[in-house]
Each structure stands twice: as C-alpha cells, then as structure tokens.
Image: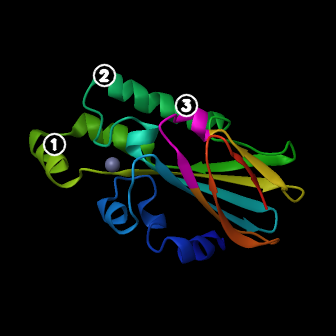
C-alpha cells in the first residue's frame, strides 16, 4: 500500500529490483561486504522489514550458483527466510503476512545459465545484493525487535537500520553485540 512510497524515500528504484542481482544499486549505495541495510515501515497495523544484504554475507558468493554446494546454500537460505526467525523475532501478536524475495529466480536462472550468460555475469556483475522483505500484521505497537541475522550471517558486522513508523523516524546501526532494535 503505502510501503512503496515510504521506502522509496530511502531507496529510490530499488524496490522494483527486490531480490535480484543489482549492480547499479551496489555501486550507488556503497555495497560493502559485512554491511547490510534494514528498512522498516509501518502503515497502521502493517509492518514491513526489508533487508538488503551483500550476497557475499548471506550466501557466501555473489554470482548465480555454479556448484551443487552453492545451490544447496541457496535452498537453505530460502528455507531460513520461510522460518523468519533466522532474521528477526517479533512479538507474538505479530502475524507474518507475506515474504517478498526473488531467490527462486536465482535458482531458475542458475539452471538455465548458458556459457555466454555465465561470462557476462563474471564480467559485469562482480557484486550483488540480496533483498528480502517480511510483511507482518501486528495487533499492537511494537516496542522492540530482536534481529537474529548476525547469527545467520556471521560475516555481517553492521546493519544500517532506518525506520519510518508512527512513533518516530530515525536510524541506528545494529551490530552482533547490539542486535535489539528499540525506538
Ligand atoms: Zn560484493
């Protein structure tokens, strides 16, 4: 609903690229390994948590999967996303509404990859980000959010977090030692 408008203020144009390899975004927004972003928006009872992470940190590689082990890693990430808790823990009165990502496209792409496409990936897409958005319906206000992602992606050292919610609009930097977000 209003989410695209709100988040657009943070990341113009990135929403349409959700989950895909996005070299333009990577260049313009300082793709730095070990550093991710979390964008939070609230629209009455609806909350959206959007993670933008270097693929190197969440997958361990930034190209399309090229080995069975990398394909397995991608499958594991898809399972982790479905569980939600590898990323964050919300109060019990929040129900998961939807998860938005394009990780399955990466799998399909991988299978259909031709030698030519392969060469172009290696030539032009040296870095990529993974975007995963969780949407919840919460019957009450949220006072804090536990971010569990640092356990899931141990190479991640900082998560630059911004929020536009009813209570406030601000930003904060989360780390493995400070992963409870409050506002
Ligand atoms: Zn990279």
Label 2 crowd bin: few (<14), some (14–19), many (20+), radius 10 Å? few
- Can residue 88 be seen in the rendering of this structure? yes
- Can residue 52 be seen in the rendering of this structure? no
Q: Secondary structure at mark 1?
A: helix
| Front-lying residue, 95 or 121 | 121
Q: Is residue 41 left or right of residue 66?
A: right
Q: Position of residue 62 (x, y in %)?
A: 32, 43
Q: Is residue 151 magenta?
A: yes
Sequence-wise, which precedes: disc 3 or disc 2?
A: 2
Residue at numbered disc 1: 118
Q: Position of residue 144 (x, y in %)?
A: 80, 52
Q: Residue at x 19, y 48 (%)?
A: 121
Sequence-wise, which precedes: disc 1 or disc 2?
A: 2
Q: Gap in Å between the C-alphas at discs 1 and 2?
A: 16 Å
| Front-lying residue, 33 or 96 | 33
Q: Is residue 163 left or right of residue 137?
A: left
Q: Is residue 118 magenta?
A: no
Q: Gap in Å between the C-alphas at discs 1 and 3?
A: 26 Å
Residue at numbered disc 2: 68
Residue at numbered disc 3: 79
Above or below, comparing residue 34 to residue 182 in the picture? above
Sequence-wise, which precedes: disc 1 or disc 3?
A: 3
* Location of residue 38 (image quadrant): bottom right
């Amino acid at each position: 609903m209003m989410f695209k408008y709100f988040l657009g203020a943070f990341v113009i144009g990135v929403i349409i690229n959700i989950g895909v390899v996005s070299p333009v975004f990577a260049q313009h927004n300082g793709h730095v390994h070990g550093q991710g972003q979390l964008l939070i928006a609230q629209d009455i009872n609806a909350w959206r948590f959007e993670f933008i992470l270097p693929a190197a940190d969440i997958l361990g590689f930034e190209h399309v999967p090229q080995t069975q082990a990398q394909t397995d890693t991608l499958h594991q990430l898809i399972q982790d996303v479905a569980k939600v808790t590898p990323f964050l823990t919300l109060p019990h009165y929040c129900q998961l509404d939807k998860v938005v990502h394009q990780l399955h496209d990466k799998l399909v792409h991988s299978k259909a990859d031709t030698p030519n496409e392969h060469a172009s990936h290696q030539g032009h897409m040296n870095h990529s980000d993974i975007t995963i958005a969780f949407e919840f319906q919460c019957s009450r206000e949220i006072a804090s959010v536990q971010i569990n992602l640092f356990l899931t992606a141990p190479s991640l050292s900082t998560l630059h977090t911004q929020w536009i919610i009813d209570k406030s609009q601000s930003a904060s930097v989360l780390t493995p030692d400070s992963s409870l977000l409050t506002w």
